[in-house]
Image (cartoon, rainbow, N blue to C red):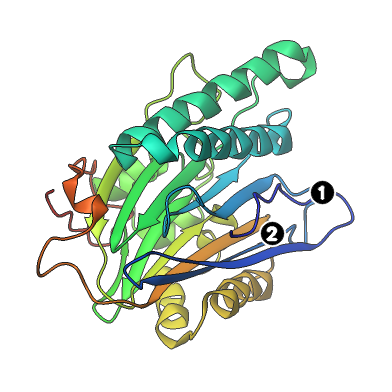
Amino acid sequence: MGPPVANNTTDGVAEDRRVGSAADPGGSRLQFAATTDVGRARARNEDAFCAEDLGARPGAVLLAVADGLGGHPGGDVASRVAVAALSEHVSANAPAALSWTDLLLAGFAAAHAAVRAAAAEQPELAGMATTLVAAVLIDDWLYWAHVGDSRLYVAGVAGMRQVTVDHSPVGDLVREGVLTWAEARIHPLRSMLSRAVGFAAEVSPDAGAERLVAGEWVLLVTDGLTAVVPAEQIEVAARTAEEPDALARALVAMAMAAGGPDNVTVVAARVTSRESMAADGGGAAAAVEPVQPAGDGWGLAPAEHAGG
């Protein structure tokens, strides 16, 4: 069994880390690690993460990061509640899951409901919300769902691609060609979101799935990293890393070296040994029909998504 869900760090704690692994009956081995740091300018960490082996489904791992909205009440509460509700729902329903995409979407609905219920119970938390990006890895399939501007990347020998789309007005301007990525990083409205868990009456996640190539990295990160470290530098770090804990810690260190103006969280995972199933289409995940993703990211190439 992998490590439990990790809530975000709080006052007086600079860093929190988790390291784990999972193996499936076919011999695949997945290593994963997560690190969060409060940064150099914040008193409280409003990020939260999950990195856990779904023990009831051998070889399946749930990864997630959430970033409570700064400037809103209870950002740290929102991220913790969302990650906990997602983990509880996915873990409880994984044994009977027929579609990992549907399970993640249901988990997002549970997270959204939990955040709104917590806000309703405590008036001082009214309006709290959070980003949320989550992934289930099983065999050589990656299933994901996403709301907000925390990101999912896949990096390998062919380069790095941003799988998710930033749900923000500034992200829209980048995709429309109005702003460059460099301009977006310093835009005064860069932190404004068009979608978040807990804020509106309903949540509308993007979701998708793809087969991974042997040795590819899966990275889930908050904007405490991406706002200060260019994608090219993240790609170089992934290309030279040998194991997940070292990569997660290196990326957090890069954010700190860039000033660490925000909380930063990195979850990294990699399949370290298995025969690729792409040739014969075998494995439990091959029967699941993936959802086509919504589009590309902030100027990076869109992910390629295989059919079921």
The residue at the point 33 percent across, 54 percent down is 298
Mark 1 neighbour class, 10 Å CA radius: few under 14, some 14 to 19, many 20 or more: some
Residue assigned mark 2? 261
Q: Looking at the rendering, which quadrant does residue 152 occupy?
A: bottom left
The residue at the point 74 percent across, 49 percent down is 45
- Where residue 109 is drawn, which disc sits there? none
Which of 270/14 is in front? Answer: 270
> Can you tell which of label 1 and label 2 is closer to the viewer?
1
x then y, percent, for residue 143: 33, 49
Type of amino acid at the residue the image marks with label 2: Pro
Mark 1 vs mark 2, CA separation in Å: 16 Å
Q: Is residue 163 visible?
A: no
The residue at the point 61 percent across, 50 percent down is 49
Query: Which element is circle 2 on?
Result: loop
Q: Name the quadrant of the N terminus.
A: bottom right
Which of 261/96 is in front? Answer: 96
Which of 101/303 is in front? Answer: 101
**Above-or-below relation of 131 to 246:** above
**Above-or-below relation of 142 to 30:** above
Position of 159 with respect to 248 (left or right) is: left
**Above-or-below relation of 113 to 155:** above
Which of 57/210 is in front? Answer: 57
- Where residue 10 is drawn, which disc sits there? 1
x then y, percent, for residue 180: 34, 58
